[in-house]
Every structure is written in structure tokens, then in C-alpha cells.
Amino acid sequence: MQNRTVHRAVLPNGMTVLCTENAAADIVAARVFIRAGGRYEPIAQAGLSHLLAAVMTKGTDRLTSQEIAERVESVGASLGADAATDYCLLSLKTVSSDFPEMLELVAELLRSPAFPEMEVELERRLTLQGIRSMQEQPFSVANNQLRQAMYGQHPYALPGLGTAETVSSLTQSDLRHYHKTYFRPDNLVVSIAGRIQPDAAMALVEQVFGDWKIPLQADGSVVPFTEPDLPPVIPNPRWVITPQDTQQAIVMLGYLASEVHNKDHLTLKLLNTYLGSGLSSRLFVELREKQGLAYEVSAFYPTRIDTSHFVAYIGTAPENAAVALEGLRSEVERLQTVQLTDKELQAAKNKLLGQYALGKQTNAQLAQISGWYETLKLGIDYDDRFQQHIPTITAEDIQAVANRYFTQPYVSLVGSEKAIELVEQVKG
């Protein structure tokens, strides 16, 4: 797929606007990124971003939830809000002729959400149901306890939904304060892609958002935007185990890994593709196809502003838990001593770049990726840099990164008493 030019401008109020023209279909998609999300929540208010996103589209100072829904559905558009670890997001897709009207609705949702008490309470109940459901899923339990062990008091330790305790304590006042703190024009990125010319897009955004002022203090100076004062992530590898009477045991190995601006980030992305992405990945072939140990087996390495984590996991029969753990650890640690062959390395590069290209097919995907890069402060040229850098990574680079990060793992286990007993015998 040919790369398309991303046009960038910064409005006088500090709002960043991106536009990618793509006239292939009569559709315009927009993504509004807010530098907020789980990273910006106090530990005692975990889940605040998720709750805010859930109720943001449920009423403004002028419109009810029903009126908002009717406006969107009457033109066949789609509109939604979401919260992630490092950002909050408002998403819009509509035919090009309706885009100006829909963008005005987006502006109203961003600037004057009402957070109606009834909607807050409804979404709180739904969130608590979601948290209870996660507590019954072995993978979620294993993943949550692994993150808590790895991150301590850093916000990355807690799930995006929050905990039953934190969500139960959130109030409408908390939502308003969070919104006032982070929803300001100089903390937003508006990314647009579709059948719209860049100049027209920039002019429209300025028309809709231009009168949104940066907040000022009593003396007329700008209220400073400060990054949260987060505690350091201090390595302390250990085991965390939860007994659960389930049909399969979940075993996870976790390693603290580089944040997105670190030079090792893309090498770890390539390594993750080789180790855990798809049916041809090393973990799948060795532990499922050859040894028959896995119901599921994979790896993941999320992109993060702060210290990230690399996780390899396997779901296995309880009687195989100890053997599966040893197999998983052996495959990860093997990367420290055995270099990838030229064939393995090229296959991983082809897979990663192919998946990357497939992630830029639609206007929504184009708006998402450019806005995401801008929000992470990687720059709009990161799309090109990503694709140029992956082919240059060597087997020596991958081995060096494996030795740098894959030392002593955190181990997370959820399974039956039998599975735990077997794993305890090989612990050490």
C-alpha cells in the first residue's frame, strides 16, 4: 500500500490537527486523541478514564443521550468514545457531506459533557459487572496479577476498568475534575482521513474548535499542563499464584521492557512477531504443534509511554502446567544464546510489515495511526521510519535485546491446586 501524505497544523489554541486525504470512498473518519487515560489516573481512582468515556456520549449541557443518538443515527454515522492506557479517544465516521455537522457534535461532546447522574450510575454498574466477569476468567486474573507485581504503585499496575473498590468510589465530581484537567485544546490531537482536502479540513476544525480557549489562571497566564508525577518502576521479579478451579492453567512469563521512545522498541516488536504472532510463530509451532502442550500460546508487547512489558503465556491442561512452564521459559531464554536464521528473521520481518500494511487500509485506520503517533510524540514521519527500520534489524540485534530484557522473569500462574502443586515442584 502506498503511503499517503499526512498534513499537520497547530491551531492558535494549541490543538494539533492532522489530515490524510483519501478519496477512494465517500467517507471521512476522525479520531480525537486526548492525552489522558489510565496513565493519568491516581491509583485510588483507577477506572476513571473508562467511566468518563462510557458516559461522555450520554449527554451534554444542551443535548440528552437520546438526542445525541438520533443525530448520529439519522445520517448513518458512527460515534464512540474509548479510554486506553496512554490516551482517551473519540471516534467518528460519516459520509463526507455530513462530516461538518458531525464534527460540531463531537466538539460539543468534548467541551461540555454533562455526565448525567443516572448515566454515571448505570455505567458504573455495567463496569462492576465487567470487573466481576474478569475475575472469573483465568487469563484476566493471571494478566492482572502479573501487572500488579510488575508495576507496584504505577498506574500501569491496574486494569483499564479499574477495581471494584475504586470504581465504587468514583463520583460525578471526579469526572468533572478529570475532564477539566485534561480536556483542553492544547492537549488534543484531531486526526482526519478520507474524502476531504487538507486545507478544508484544517479550516473546518478551526471553525468548530477555534474559540475553545486554553485555560487561564487569575493573573491571565496559561494554566500549565504538567505530566503526572509517577513512581519509578523498580524491577523485583517474583511469582504470583492464584488457585482457581478451571479446566486449564494459565502460565505467564513477564519481563519489563522498553518504552516506545527507546531504541530497542522496534526490535522487541519484531521479536514479539517471531515468538508469538500467529500460527507460524515459534511458540505456537514448538509448544502446541510439536509438543501438544497448549490450548493457546502467544506473546504480547504493548506500546507504552512509560516502561512496557513483554509477556509470553500459555494455556494448558493442569497436569501439564509444570512442563508448559519449562517449555515457555526455554523458548524465551533460547533467544539469548541461539540467533535467528536468515530465513526466520526474514519471515518475521515480512509478517510484521504485512500486518502493518493491513492495519492502514481504511480511513478509520489511517486516522487512528497518525493520531496515535502524534499523541505519543513520535511525529507524523514515524510511519515511514517504522517501515524503513524493520528491514535493518539483524539477528545480532535481536539476540542483544533478548539478553538485555529476558533475564529473570516474573511468573504468573492461575490454575487448579494440582497445577499449582506441579509448578511449585519446579519453582526456583
Image (cartoon, rainbow, N blue to C red):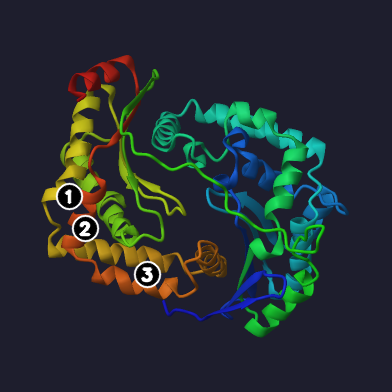
Q: Which x, y percent locates residue 120?
A: 75, 37
Q: Which x, y percent locates residue 114?
A: 81, 47
Give me the residue at 50% from left, 73% from top. 380
What whole-number distance in Å separates the C-alpha atoms at marks 2 and 3? 16 Å
Work out whether mark 3 precedes mark 1 in sequence or the reverse, and give the earlier one: 1
**Residue carrying label 1:** 335
For the N terminus, give its image quadrant: bottom left
Residue type at mark 2? Ile
Contact check, label 2 and label 3, Cβ < 8 Å: no
> Which corner quadrant of the image does residue 254 belong to?
top left
Give me the residue at 76% from left, 45% from top. 176
- Comparing 201 with 277, the one in front is 201
| Horizontal side, residue 159 vs residue 1: left or right | right
Work out whether mark 1 precedes mark 2 in sequence or the reverse, and give the earlier one: 1
> Which corner quadrant of the image does residue 141 belong to?
top left
Contact check, label 1 and label 2, Cβ < 8 Å: yes
- Comparing 35 with 70, the one in front is 35
Determine whether the residue tagged by mark 1 lies in a helix, strand or loop.
helix
Residue type at mark 3? Phe
For the C terminus, give its image quadrant: top left
**Residue carrying label 3:** 386
Give me the residue at 28% from left, 15% from top. 418
- Comparing 141 with 195, the one in front is 141
What whole-number distance in Å separates the C-alpha atoms at marks 3 and 1? 23 Å
Residue type at mark 1? Leu
239 over 59 or under it: above or below: above
**Residue carrying label 2:** 398
304 over 132 or under it: above or below: below
Work out whether mark 2 precedes mark 3 in sequence or the reverse, and give the earlier one: 3
Determine whether the residue tagged by mark 2 lies in a helix, strand or loop.
helix
